[in-house]
Every structure is written in structure tokens, then in C-alpha cells.
Image: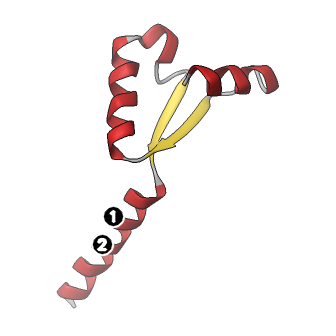
Amino acid sequence: MDKVNDTIAFRNPDRVVVLTADQPLYALALQIQLRWPDKYGEDKIVMLFGGLHIEMAALNSIETFLQAS
């Protein structure tokens, strides 16, 4: 998180960093954000689920829609 934050700050100092991660790393990153909010708070780094979890949620939604029809 430090390396990405430093790289983005060097190139675009007024931008908020957006990171994507799968579930285990996402949970770890959120724990880090809660532990050190002044350095890694949500106003400085935004965490999102990775593509795999977004795809799984979309497929589950499609399955629910098809079962209901």
C-alpha cells in the first residue's frame, strides 16, 4: 500500500488511490485501514473487491433471476 500510494502521489498528488484485491487481501487491507486511519484511511486509499468476486456476484444474480422466471 505504501509503494502504490507513493507512486500515485508522485504522479498525481491530489488523487485518491484505488486498489482492488481478492477477499483475503481485501480483508487484510481493511484491517490495516482501521488500525492506521490517518495514514491508510478511506479518504486516502479506496479498496474494492477484485474482478473474480464481482463476476461471481453477477453470476449468482443471473442464477437467481433465471430460477424466478
Q: Position of residue 43 (x, y in %)?
A: 52, 21
Asked which secondary structure carries label 1, the reply is helix
Per the model, the C-alpha gap separating discs 1 and 2 is: 6 Å
Q: Residue at x 32, y 78 (%)?
A: 62
29 above or below 51? above
Per the rendering, the mark at residue 17 is none
Q: Residues within 10 Å of mark 1 (few under 14, many from 20)?
A: few
* Quadrant where the image shows the N terminus: top right
Q: Position of residue 10 (x, y in %)?
A: 78, 20
Asked which secondary structure carries label 2, the reply is helix
Q: Is residue 11 left or right of residue 34?
A: right
Q: Which amino acid, by three-letter code, is at mark 2? A: Ser
Residue under pointer 2: 61
Q: Is residue 54 left or right of residue 18?
A: left
Residue 54 visible at all: yes
Residue under pointer 1: 57
Q: Which amino acid, by three-letter code, is at mark 1? A: Ala
Q: Position of residue 44 (x, y in %)?
A: 56, 21
Color encoding of the figure? secondary structure
62 above or below 21? below
13 above or below 27? above
Q: Is residue 42 left or right of residue 34?
A: right
Residue 14 visible at all: no
